[in-house]
Amino acid sequence: MREQVKTYVLLGLVLSSITLTSRLLFGLPMMETVKPSSFEQLVFGELRPVSRQVLPELRLQEKGEFRVIKPWEQNHASVWESVQQLIFYSQVPALAEAPPAETNGLRLWAVFPVSIPPSVWGGSQRLVGLEISDMVWLKSDPQFVWYHDIKDGWLKARLMVLSDEWEFAISSAFAEASLYRFLEAGVLEKLGLSAQGEILLPAEAPVLASRLVGSESLDRDKLVRSIFVDTALVRQIEERDGAFIYTDGHKGLRLFAHGEVEFSAPSSEPGSEMMETIPALRRTAQYLQLMGGWQDHLYLNHLVREESFLFSRRQWDSYLVSFISVQHGTRLVSANPPVKLRFSDRGIIYYKRQVRTLTTTVEEQRPLIEPLDALQTVAQLLDEDDKSHALTEIFPAYFLHSAAGLSSVAPPVWVILFNNNRAAVIHGQTGIFMAWLE
C-alpha cells in the first residue's frame, strides 16, 4: 500500500515539474484559453442602416400654406417611401437654375440634414456621383425633379412616368400634417435681421409644459467590454467625484456618476485617407452600436469633414458627427449635443455621450409665446456685427440649462439659430432670455 502511495506522489511531482518547466520555457497560455470571456465584444442594439440614418424633413406648399412632416413624426416613413419615387424614376440630371418659388401651385420639398448620395435608397444609376441636400418637385412642371448637389448646385432631371395616383397620394398624406407659415422678409428687416433660406414657423402656438429629466443608464461592465477587446489589459481608476477611468495605455474611457461618457484614442489621429459619405455613415452606426446604442429618439444632425495639413503639406481628414434628441415630438437642447464623435479612417478619436430622457410634466400645459416676440427679444440683444449673421431656423424645444446636464427640469423654450451655429434660447412662456448656445 505504501509503495502505491509513493508511486502516486512521485508521479504527481514529475507532472508538476513538467508543467512548471513548460511555463518557464514557453510562457503562460494565450489569454483566450485563460479568460475567453474577456475577449467577447458586446454591442448595444441593432446596427442602423444608412437608409435610416439620414431622414429628410418633408414640406408641401400649396396656395401659400406649408405642411411639414418631421422625420420623427408617425407617418414620415410611409410618406417618404412615396416621395422616393422621384429618385427611382429620375433620368440623368443637368445643370439648371434654382426651382421657382411656387405661390399658387403645389411644391414638394425634401430637406436633408446632411448631403447624401441618393443611391442610398436604391434609386437609379443615373444619379451616381451626386450628394444632395434638397430635392424639389413642382406641380406646374411635373415631368421634372430638382436636386441641389453639394458640388454642382441645382440640377434638373426629367422624370419617367409617375403613376396617376402618386400626386393624389402625396396630397392626401400631408392632409393631417402640421401647418406652418412663412416668416416674411419684411418682418426681419424691421428688426435689422436677415434670413438664410425659408424660415417656417408653426401656424399655431405649441402647447407644452416643463418636464422632469432623467439620465440614461448604461451597463458599465458591458460598455467596457464592448470598447476594450482584451479587458485583462485594462486598468480601472476611481476618481474622487465618483467617476471611473478605464485605460489600456492607448485609449481611455471615462464614466461619470451623472451618466456622461467620454472616450478618447489619440492614436487614431491624424487620418491618412479620405472617406466618402456612405462609409463615414456606416462607421458612425458601428461606433454607436459599440458605445451605448442608437436610441430611437436620436437623429443625425451634422456630419462634417474636417481637413488639416501637416508641415509636409499632406492632407489629413477626420469627420465630426453630432446628434439631436427628439422626445414627445419636441427637440431637447442643451449646451452639448447628446452624442458627439470624431473619427478618421484609423478609428474613433473622440466620443462624448450624455443622453437625457424627458419624463412626466410638472405643470399644466400652456401655449408658448409668439415666436416673433422671442425673435424681437433676441434682436435687442444683438449688436451690428451679430446682426450680420443670417437667421436659419426657429423652433420650439425643451432646454437643459446646466452645461453638465444636471438639471432636473426642462422648461419649454424657443430656439433661434443663426448661420454661425450660435443659438439664442428664450423661455417659451415668460419670454425671458435664458442662454446662448454655441
Image (cartoon, rainbow, N blue to C red):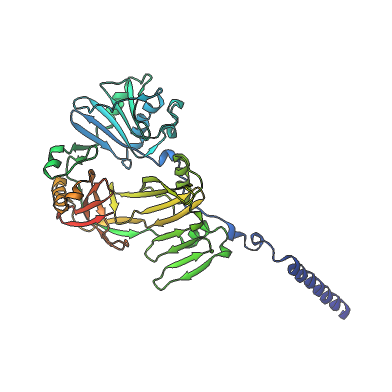
Q: In the figure, 357 relative to 134: above or below?
A: below
Q: In which quarter of the image is the N terminus?
A: bottom right
State whether residue 121 appears in this view: yes
Residue lying furthest bottom in this view? 2
- Please name the residue shown 69% across and 63% down the image: 29
- Please name the residue shown 41% across and 60% down the image: 261
In-image side of 345 versus 413 (left or right): right
Q: In the figure, 232 relative to 158: above or below?
A: below
Between 142 and 155, the one nearer to me in the picture:
155
Between 18 and 311, the one nearer to me in the picture:
311
- Please name the residue shown 45% across and 41% down the image: 49
Picture quadrant where residue 69 is located? top left
State whether residue 46 appears in this view: no
Return the x and y of residue 18 as percentages of the image width and height. 79, 69
Return the x and y of residue 369 as percentages of the image width and height. 14, 49
Q: In which quarter of the image is the C terminus?
A: bottom left
The number of numbered badges drawn on the structure is 0
Return the x and y of residue 131 as percentages of the image width and height. 40, 34
Picture quadrant where residue 82 is located? top left
Picture quadrant where residue 134 is located? top left
In-image side of 194 versus 54 (left or right): left
Return the x and y of residue 330 as percentages of the image width and height. 27, 48
Residue lying furthest left in this view? 190
